[in-house]
Image (spheres, rainbow, N blue to C red):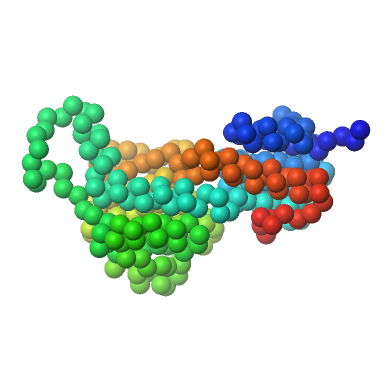
Amino acid sequence: MPARPRVHLTAPVPREVAAALEGDFDLVDSPEGADGILVALTARVDERYLERAGPQLRVVANYAVGVNNIDLDATAARGVVVTNTPDVLTRATAELAVGLMLALLRRIAEGDRFIRRDSEWEFSLEFMLGSSLDGTELLIVGPGRIGRETARLAEAFGARSAFAGRGADLQGLLPAADVVSLHVPLTDATRHLIDAEALSAMRQSAVLVNVARGPVVDERALVDALRDGVIAGAALDVYEREPEVEEGLLSLENVVLTPHLGSATRDTRVAMGMLCVDALRAVLLEGRRPANAVG
């Protein structure tokens, strides 16, 4: 009986995904000698990692849409196929983006903290007033699948959407936005896309939402902007030095923070995993290039 392909997992996966993998592959504890690797976004696949894995490696299945954790030039030079998980996490991530907008604008997280501190309060018509998404000018930075789905969901609340890339159109649109929502991939061009200059171009009443990648925002500049009243608030699901969070963000009441929950529903995470399984099967068992190959 021929040997089954060997697959290494860089992190635990949902039980449904593990069962599917175990049906076709031998799961190994190390990348050395593996034919395929299923990579969580917390693992960095670079030249050193590929050298460690060995020349038999044929496919790297990334358990995410973004592939900034993988050196695509190094994998291409070795003939290693890289895949990602598009589409299946679009709705879940867009839902979180809108949820963060609502939590920030309606001061939901702030109110939760207020109650948990056992603060004294009574109902008042002027107490902890927030603002609505209805009538809000929403700027989607990065109008891909997730960005456009975020706009669609926000528009159900009455928001009006505009779209920007990373160039001059962004600088021109920032001053008109009430909410700026980030959905760009992390590249050299988008690192610190939102810096002190971009923040200063925003309205004082505007808020920033980031469900893309942490380094798209200069977090130290963001802390300064929030403390100085340059912008009104921020909601972040991703961080520049994740899982470390810029300390200055932790004490600010006009900030909502979540631990990278964009795709964090069970159905979504399982669907992402099954795309990885299908990609591994395509390359290692069927000898074909999967539709979700990148690069």
**Residue at 81% across / 49% down in the picture?**
286
Apparent side of residue 13 relative to residue 101 in the rendered image (left or right): right
Q: Can you name the residue that lies furthest to the top here?
A: 118
Seen from the viewer's position, the closer of residues 263 and 174 is 263
**Image quarter (top left, top right, bottom left or bottom right) of the N terminus:** top right
Q: Nearer the viewer, residue 141 or 75?
A: 141
> How far from the left and from the top, in percent, is residue 188?
54, 59
Residue nearest the observer in this picture, 68 or 285 = 285
Q: Position of residue 185 (x, y in %)?
A: 52, 57
Quadrant for the C terminus, please: bottom right
Kindly tell me whether residue 278 is visible in this rendering.
yes
Q: Residue at x 75, y 42 (%)?
A: 36
One can see residue 60 in this view:
no
Give the answer, above or below, for where 263 lies relative to 176.
above
Can you tell which quarter of the image residue 73 is in? bottom right
Lateral position of residue 2 relative to residue 36, left or right = right
Q: Position of residue 178 (x, y in %)?
A: 28, 61
Farthest-out residue, right: 1
